[in-house]
Image (cartoon, grey):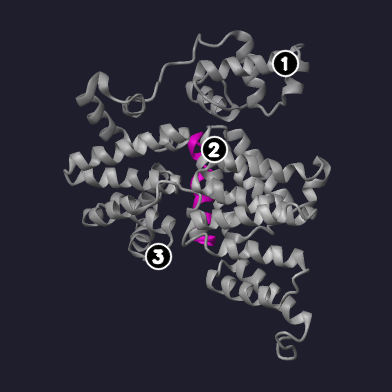
Amino acid sequence: ALERLHEGEDFLYALCMVQKAYLASFEGDAQSMRHYTDRALAALPEDERYLRGMMCQVQAAACFNADPLQSKSSFLKTVKLQCGLGNKTLSCSAYCNLATVCANLGHFDEARSYANLSFSLYEPRERRFKPMLSYAYLAKMACAYEVGSFDEVLDSYGQLESVSAKGIVPERYAEAQTIKAKALFRIGSAEAAPLFLEALAAQGPGALQGYPTLPMVRDFCDKHRMQAIEQAASESDRRQVRLFGYALAYFLGQMSRCEEACVFAEALNAEDRLAKVHALFVAALFSECVAQHASAEVYLDEALLLCAAYGFSETVEGNAEILRPLAHRMAAVRGREAHPLLIRVSAAPAVSSAEGLLTDRETDVMRLVASGTTIAEAAAQLYLSRDTVKKHLANVYAKLGVHSKMQAVALLRERGEIWDR
């Protein structure tokens, strides 16, 4: 088509530029995204608000990897400009893109807000026909993971797949797979490692946007050492890829990378919250390993203070196993002056038996839940109201110190309180 069309002479030329920009965005080609959106915006009529709006969003997405905070700022401008135009599709796209950018940065309150705004545009029965909502479900996954709501992570992943029909940009789909794998890893599911490996093989940079935990990186290193060595040596200007490389280097014992990892952590903007915290974790581990103990303490203190300020519960819990030796040393020296979060990380996980802890009725409820019974079905079988069953579940969560049915079931199976039939 472009061989027959000329810039400024035919609207179809502008439309071709739009399509080229869309294709570039699906391929994650930031340079081409910028190039074609510039040409599309120059060629599109001023009153062509829908296509111009979508090109502004592709422009904002183009700078995400190089400068995610600038990407957020650009999407905020598109939301302000476009959401008053009365076009649901344009508004939904703007909200969804902004939700995923905020979630990746660790700005979870904003991510939830924009995701909910996108859902509010459509009735529940309409939502499964709106592929753009897959991005809102991705943002929901990231937010749910951070508060330890693993059931919601898995439910949102199912919703993402149902609305997208894999139409989501491949990098974002790989990111969703990693977040799902993190939830599965935390509940001890054997499905976690293969899923993460699949995401990494299909779309590595996208998979790493889901911030795999340090135990996941260690296990990948142990099981795929040659691949880990290659990944650690690869160079990239993408912050998640570099972060993964430094974490691999630590587990591979490449202590010569210590200074490089520390410089990387220090250079990250504190508002790039998730990346900053994870990079500080890695810098702390490196520093401790090369006997730079004072630096290790500074890095871990900063990371935990950020986690406390931002409410990063699972970022702490999911990485605590690896950080525990350093945290234990620091807490022992500081005693009562140690920060509560440092004490929490330094303490060994509770292993008390659940035997005798649950009432008979709570155990009955959990056995039904473990077999796949719904709350409504459990209520009918036990001759209880749904609210009573929910209350029993809440009591079980509190007693076991978990946040979801899947965690509770996994723990009770481990303790031998319930079993597969």
Residue 351 location, x and y as percent? 40, 21
Q: Which residue is mark 1?
A: 387
Q: Nearer the viewer, residue 321 or 34?
A: 34
Range shown magenta: 185-204
Q: Residue furthest bottom?
A: 4
Secondary element type, mark 2: helix
Residue 238 location, x and y as percent? 43, 61
**What is the quadrant of residue 22 in the picture?**
bottom right
Q: Which residue is mark 3?
A: 236
Q: Nearer the viewer, residue 347 or 116?
A: 116
Specify the quadrant that holds the N terminus.
bottom right
Q: Are marks 2 and 3 in contact (CB under 8 Å)?
A: no
Residue 217 appears left or right of 294: right
Residue 113 location, x and y as percent? 64, 40
Say if 332 sits above or below 194 in the image. Answer: above
Identify the mark nearer the N-term, 1 or 3. Answer: 3
Gap between marks 1 and 3, in whole Å? 52 Å
Which numbered mark, 1 or 3, is in the foreground of this view?
A: 3
Magenta segment main secondary structure? helix
Q: Are marks 2 and 1 in contact (CB under 8 Å)?
A: no
Identify the mark nearer the N-term, 2 or 1. Answer: 2
Q: Which residue is mark 2?
A: 145
Residue type at mark 2: give it: Tyr
Q: Are marks 1 and 3 in contact (CB under 8 Å)?
A: no
Secondary element type, mark 3: loop
Residue 328 appears left or right of 17: left
Residue 380 location, x and y as percent? 78, 17
